[in-house]
């Protein structure tokens, strides 16, 4: 096997490993969560690199098998990625600034195929490349009283989330790390 094929094989395995890591492990680093969390694109890249590496194989039958498997894998990754993107896309609904360096991020998405929406809340601690983001809550407006209404900072280490039914949920934050000690979910 030529050195080019060996390098492409190693790169393909690395891309496949990154795809699996991105799919199964949810990181709290914003850099990884927002910019490198594309497991299906990494899967397609791994399949394409495997096909390119197979071009250097000596046995024709093995080359064909790898081409077919890489093509099937890339097709499945593209189909699954487009399906996931269609049904799990979120839109930004804004930020609620807190004590520096904290902010609460609001995101809205559809709840399945119906008209209901889900509001996702996360706590972000800004720190450049080491910015972190943790889940804070999830609210489905399927039941009108459970729909998200507002979020307010009640202190440097606490947040209060209100729903339209009047309920409020205090969420304490760990003073050392800033990570929420609890999360709130209604209908998610």
Image (tube, rainbow, N blue to C red):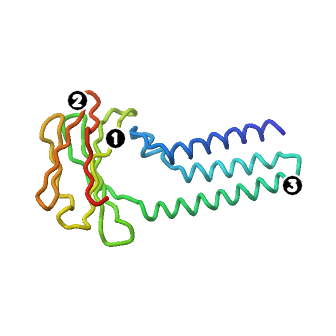
Residue 61's disc number: 3
Instruction: Indicate the quadrant where residue 178 lies.
Output: top left
Q: Residue at x 73, y 37 (%)?
A: 7
Q: Is residue 169 left or right of residue 83?
A: left
User: Mark 1 against mark 2, which lies toward the viewer?
Assistant: 2
Q: Residue 133: give its label.
A: 1
Residue at the spot of label 2: 175
Q: CA distance from mark 1 to mark 3?
A: 48 Å
User: Where residue 80 appears, x then y in whole percent?
Assistant: 55, 61
Marks 1/2: CA–CA distance: 15 Å
What percent of the width, then of the height, locates residue 90?
A: 37, 58
How far apart in space, not on screen, are marks 3 and 2 (Cα)? 61 Å
Q: Nearer the viewer, residue 137 or 186?
A: 186
Other residues around mark 2 within 10 Å, as few (<14) / some (14–19) / many (≥20): few
Q: Are marks 1 and 2 in contact (CB under 8 Å)?
A: no
Q: Position of residue 157 (x, y in %)?
A: 18, 34
Q: Quadrant of the C terminus?
A: bottom left
Q: Is residue 33 left or right of residue 166?
A: right
Q: Residues within 10 Å of mark 1 (few under 14, many from 20)?
A: many
């Amino acid at each position: 096997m030529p050195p080019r094929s060996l390098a492409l094989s190693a790169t393909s395995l690395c891309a496949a490993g990154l795809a699996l890591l991105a799919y199964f492990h949810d990181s709290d680093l914003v850099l990884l969560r927002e910019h490198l969390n594309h497991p299906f694109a990494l899967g397609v890249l791994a399949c394409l690199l495997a096909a390119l590496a197979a071009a250097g194989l000596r046995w024709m039958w093995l080359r064909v098998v790898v081409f077919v498997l890489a093509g099937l894998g890339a097709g499945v990754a593209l189909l699954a990625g487009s399906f996931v993107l269609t049904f799990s896309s979120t839109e930004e609904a804004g930020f609620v600034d807190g004590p520096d360096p904290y902010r609460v991020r609001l995101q809205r998405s559809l709840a399945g195929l119906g008209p209901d929406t889900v509001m996702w809340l996360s706590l972000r601690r800004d720190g450049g490349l080491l910015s972190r983001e943790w889940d804070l809550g999830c609210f489905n407006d399927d039941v009108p009283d459970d729909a998200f209404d507002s979020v307010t900072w009640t202190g440097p280490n606490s947040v209060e989330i209100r729903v339209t039914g009047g309920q409020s949920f205090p969420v304490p934050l760990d003073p050392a790390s800033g990570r929420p000690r609890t999360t709130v979910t209604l209908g998610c």
